[in-house]
Image (spheres, helix red, strand yellow):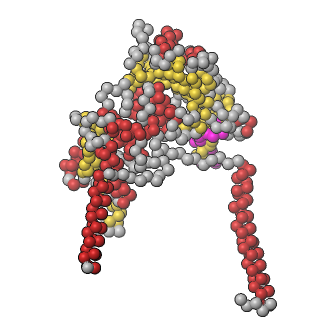
Amino acid sequence: MKKQTIITQLIIIVAIISVANFISNQLYFRLDFTEDERYTLSDATKDILSDLDDVITVSAYFSEDLPPQLLNNRKDFEDILIEYEQRSGGNVVYEFINPNEDQTKEQEVQQKGIGPIMINVRENDRVEQMRAYMGAVLQMGEQKESIPLIQPGAAMEYELTTSIKKLSVQDKPKIAVLAGHGETSLSSIPQLSQQLGVLYSVENYEIKDEESIPDFYRAIAILAPSDTVPQSHFDKLDTYLSSGGKLFIAYSNVQGDLQQGLLSTAPDIGLVNWLNQKGVKLGADFVVDVECATVNVQQRQGFFTINSQKEFPFFPRVSNFEDHPITKGLDEITFSFATNVVPVNTDTSVVSTPIVFTSGSSGTERAPSYIDIQRRWTENDFGMGVQSLGVALEGLNGGLGKMVVFGNGDFYLNGEGQQVRQLPPDHVNLASNAIDWLADDTGLIELRTKGINSRPLESIEDSTKEVIKYANVFAPILLLLIYAFVRRLRNQQKRQQWMQGNFG
């Protein structure tokens, strides 16, 4: 009887395990305890997956025998693909392929845009290099999209979702980048162009006197113009706004040159006056801020040249944002040689929202002037409090016109030739988010900024620093004295108890 009971219990346990295993395979889920929910799919991803009406095949190319930390990357990618498959109703299917199996496979993978990375692996107490692959190719019909390197964390979801979005969008709406007035060219903003290219077709556009601005442009970007804009072009922009057009404007009314050490006012190209008519006032002075970036300074000491980093208040480090779709998820952006942007609306139908601010310790510097890197800044230089560096406007020209204006024209700029620089993600995200908001497509804003965290140390006043310094010196000594006093007191109590004959 006892033996039969044990067998019955074993059968029940096996049945429970089998049912649990079946349910877990059918109803896959992950528990996410990370602060930024990096392992939880964003609403943007869920929407894109639910809208799929065709099958997308993901071929994941991962090498075998990867080191443990990279094996975790492969496992995370497989987990997210399982979730994508379920969320899409089976419209996302996947396979894992090991390119290292033979040379032919490696060549095929490389032709698809996925190259190897060299990693160090330890074998038989020796460190050897291994050619590893961690990429993917997505295919829908005849269209293909490659992810050369799968990044861990939230970047994994962003790359996968944006690639799916690229494949699934049939007719992309158009975004125009205005040309003809010395504006920044498309070739100078590859990061921004690539990011916008997920949702839009981005192209240069020049205003023509004989025709109106096409209304099929979801938004027009005016990026740092340097030449005079004819009044007839402003008239056409007015007409475009009146018909519900959207404008993104990044322009600084001042110019700074670190090489020459000069601070000057930008030439009058007509844009400042036109913006003032729209209810936006661009300042004529440089904004300076205690919270600022550093610049590299060379100093001669004898026969040696020493490079050092020095804080430069003309480069405000901005981390103060309005709660707005444009600034959602942003952490920090550096504005170099910027002017403030102030709403001056008299039209009550226009809604103006400042969205980007300096710290509470900022000021202004007039131009023309010279840059003194060794200048000793004081509290009096930063007495203006919080200043706005960007404004979003709705309801322009009595209708659905919208505009976003920033008092800096190069925070999104990579440059060209020898001056090319890689931008921090938030610099590009601010411009992309603004254009998404203008174009009424904010779906990727949440995903774009997910998992991007810049957490600089908070600034500490000099008096607080002194307190901390002396506390570090004297606190250990004080603790030792307290311990010695307590120890001596206890010994005295024990001695008194012994002398009184109390040996307990």
Residue 175 picture location, percent across and down: 41, 24
Residue 162 is left or right of residue 8, and the answer is right
One can see residue 297 in this view: no
The mark total stands at 0
What residue is shown at x 50% (from left), y 33% (from top)? 325
Query: At which x and y percent is residue 195?
Result: 41, 34
22 above or below 444? below
As drawn, the residue found furthest toward the bottom would be 501
Q: Quadrant of the N terminus?
A: bottom left
The spot of residue 382 in percent (x, y) is 70, 36
Where residue 50 sits: x, y (%)?
Answer: 33, 38
Q: Could you say which is closer to the camera, residue 23 or residue 150? A: 23
Residue at the top extreme, as displayed: 210
Instruction: Judge whether residue 424 is colored magenta.
Output: no
Toward the front, the furthest residue is: 1
Closer to us: 189 or 19 = 19
Q: What residue sits 59% from the left and 41% below the top? A: 294
Q: Residue at x 50, y 10 (%)?
A: 235
User: Quadrant of the image for the C terminus?
Assistant: bottom right
Residue 4 visible at all: yes
User: Is residue 149 placed above or below 20 in the rendered structure?
Assistant: above
Vertical order, 483 against 308 (above or below): below
Residue stretch rendered in magenta on the structure: 289-304
Q: Looking at the image, is 126 positioned above or below residue 393?
A: below
How would you classify the magenta stretch by its main secondary structure?
Answer: strand
Name the residue at 76% across, 75% down: 485
Residue 97 relative to residue 324: left or right: left
